[in-house]
């Protein structure tokens, strides 16, 4: 067996609790090695310019459609063409924010997408899992929901 080209910072399960401190959210996310970029549930997405900078405002929900709406306003980091799991390509807005996962804290890029029909409000993609190992048979290795 080949050795890993890096030293893993942590082992995570297929589902983990993460905190997005700049958004004031703690939520359950699903690790998805098939997705390049991470994604966060967002509704009512609007962009605007203020003081020469682009901003995005949206409403998210921490744990499903019945949870209270959580309004967010952040700098817009980027806009990217993303191909979803069903093969449809669409343009999505991207935010950059710190994420806490267990003892780790590092910045992640999140595309904003309507995930209300999905089980998890956040998807953790390959870019955010760059130095992590995933144990697909385990869940919540860094804290219970």
Image (cartoon, rainbow, N blue to C red):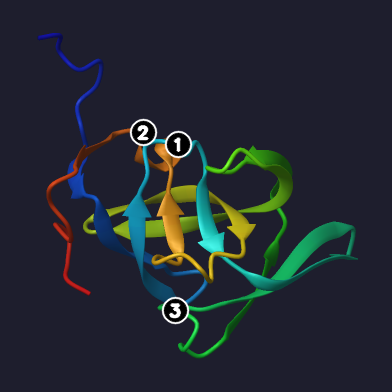
The answer to whether 72 appears left or right of 145 in the picture is right
Marks 2 & 1, CB-CB < 8 Å contact: yes
Q: Where does residue 132 sit, x and y in percent of width and height?
A: 26, 38
The structure residue drawn at horizontal position 22% and vertical position 59%, both measured from the top left corner, is: 102
Q: Where does residue 116 sit, x and y in percent of width and height?
A: 53, 71
Please tell me the numbered disc located at residue 130. 2
Q: Which residue is mark 3?
A: 64
Q: Which residue is mark 1?
A: 127
Tell me how far mark 2 sits from mark 1, CA to CA: 5 Å
Q: Nearer the viewer, mark 2 or mark 3?
A: 3
Which residue is nearer to you in this view: 18 or 62?
62
The answer to whether 54 appears left or right of 128 in the picture is right
- The quadrant of the image that shows the N terminus is top left
Neighbor class of circle 1 (other Cα within 10 Å; few <14, some 14-19, many 20+) is: some
Q: Where does residue 96 sit, x and y in percent of width and height?
A: 58, 52
Q: Where does residue 19 sit, x and y in percent of width and height?
A: 37, 67
């Amino acid at each position: 067996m080949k050795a890993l080209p890096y030293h893993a910072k942590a082992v995570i399960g297929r589902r983990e609790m993460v905190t997005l401190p700049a958004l004031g959210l703690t939520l359950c996310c699903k690790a998805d090695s098939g997705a390049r970029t991470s994604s966060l549930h967002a509704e009512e997405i609007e962009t605007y310019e203020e003081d020469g900078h682009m901003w995005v405002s949206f409403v998210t929900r921490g744990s499903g459609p019945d949870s209270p709406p959580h309004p967010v306003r952040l700098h817009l980091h980027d806009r990217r063409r993303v191909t979803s799991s069903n093969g449809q390509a669409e343009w999505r807005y991207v935010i950059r924010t710190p994420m806490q996962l267990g003892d780790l804290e590092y910045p992640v890029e999140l595309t904003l997408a309507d995930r209300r029909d999905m089980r998890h409000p956040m998807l953790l993609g390959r870019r955010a899992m760059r130095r992590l190992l995933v144990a697909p048979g385990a869940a919540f290795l860094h804290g219970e929901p």
